[in-house]
Image (cartoon, rainbow, N blue to C red):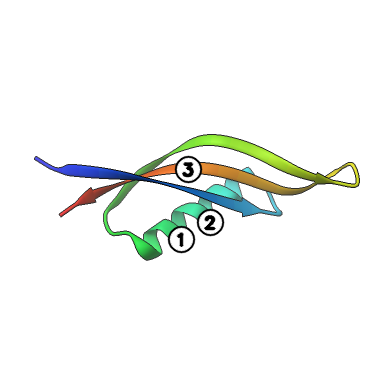
Amino acid sequence: MSIARITELSASSKKGFDDAIEKGIKRANDTLENVEGAWVQDMKVVCKGGKIAEYRVQLKVTFVLR
């Protein structure tokens, strides 16, 4: 039997949502052990001058406790 924990984090990118998700997962792996997956809870953009300036995602990252 395993026990998992979920932590919430946000990540951003100037390139796109996929890049923001990858950055968030990479950062989670740098800090947490046994990352099993993530759920993209929310996606939004920041606009400046009528253009998209930044893509942001809110992630719920699941990792297994030892």
Mark on residue 59? 3
Q: Are circles 1 and 3 on residues that touch, CB within 8 Å?
A: no
Instruction: Give amino acid for label 1.
Output: Arg
- Quarter of the picture containing the C terminus is bottom left
Quarter where residue 61 is shown: top left
Q: Nearer the viewer, mark 3 or mark 2?
A: 3
Marks 2 and 1 sit apart, C-alpha to C-alpha, by 6 Å
Residue 34 x %, y %: 26, 54
Instruction: Give amino acid for label 3.
Output: Leu
Mark on residue 3? none
Q: Find disc 2 in the rendering and name its residue.
A: 23
Please state which of residues 18 and 53 is positioned toward the viewer in this rendering: 53
Marks 1 and 3 sit apart, C-alpha to C-alpha, by 12 Å
Residue 1 x %, y %: 8, 40
Residue at left offset 53%, top offset 56%: 23
The secondary element bearing badge 3 is classed as strand
Residue 54 x %, y %: 72, 50
